[in-house]
Amino acid sequence: MPSGHRLYVMERIPDDPVTAPLVVLVHGSLDRAASFSRVTRRLPELHTVAYDRRGYNHSRWAEMTPATLDGHIDDLVEVIAGRPAVVVGHSFGGTVALGAAVRPGGPDPILAVGAYEPPLPWLGPWATRQRTGSERVEDRADRDPAEEAERFFRRMVGDEAWERLPDGTKRARRADGAALAAELADIRTHTAPFDVTALTIPAVFGRGSASIPHHRETPAWLHEHVPGSELVEIEGAAHGAHLTHPDAFAQFVLTVLERAAGTGRNRSAAG
């Protein structure tokens, strides 16, 4: 289902839905909506939406591809389309979700937000290490974006995983290089684009027990500085928890829903 700006949207409406808000899932850098398929299959009773962010995969040809975080936040607001929703973002998608939730004018209709290991490099020197490769992309601005996309994938997922990809999939990932370079360069800033501590809706932050230290530090900082927030740790997972631990990531989504309904409980960690 394309949006007015021709974003590619995957919407799943269950035959027998439970009474719950819409769940919008926002993917990270060099990823796509389909990466949440394993998660949504474990949430058959929920109305879910995932979309290819502008510049990626089926949304690669969307008009006026944004090079800014604000542009991706605009797209998320459009996808929500005024419907009461909870928003859960992975990695850069978590940054987009948080930005939408604190945008001036209020978070309505976002009822609760979940962010799994979101890069927020402006928080301080310790957080600049969590640019998810942005410093390497920007410092190679004269390099081919397709080559940088392949390097990013190999660095984040592994050489063996890259080599296992079909040739068509490799070409598609390399074609996402321009969007990758633009968005990661945009968040390489010491000026905060938004104040995440101003969140006024329930917030749940996630991390993996096997994630590298600087991916784990930001969710911990957020939990400490966002009043009433919850920190969920997925045992045995690293950064790609939605792919490797879909059951636990689905539970992470349910936790955000619980907080939206006011039935959640504060936890410092959960498996």
Image (cartoon, helix red, strand yellow):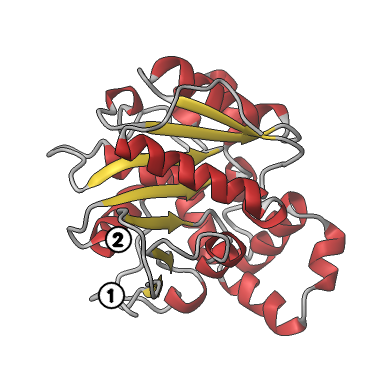
Residue 139 visible:
no
Of helix, strand and loop, which one carries label 2? helix
The answer to whether 98 appears left or right of 234 in the picture is left
**Foreground pick, 257 / 236:** 257
* Residue at the extreme left: 105
Q: Does residue 186 sit above or below 207 in this rendering? A: below
Q: Which mark is residue 3?
A: 1
Disc 1 to disc 2: CB gap under 8 Å: yes
Q: Quadrant of residue 232?
A: top right
Count of marks, rendered view: 2
Which residue is depicted at the point 46% across and 23% down?
222
Q: Does residue 45 sit above or below 200 in this rendering? A: below
Q: Characterize the local packing of mark 1: few (<14), some (14-19) or many (20 or more) Cα atoms within 10 angstroms.
A: some
Residue 47 position within the rendered picture, expressed as x and y whole percent measured from the top left: 37, 64
Q: Which mark is residue 75?
A: 2
Residue 119 visible:
yes
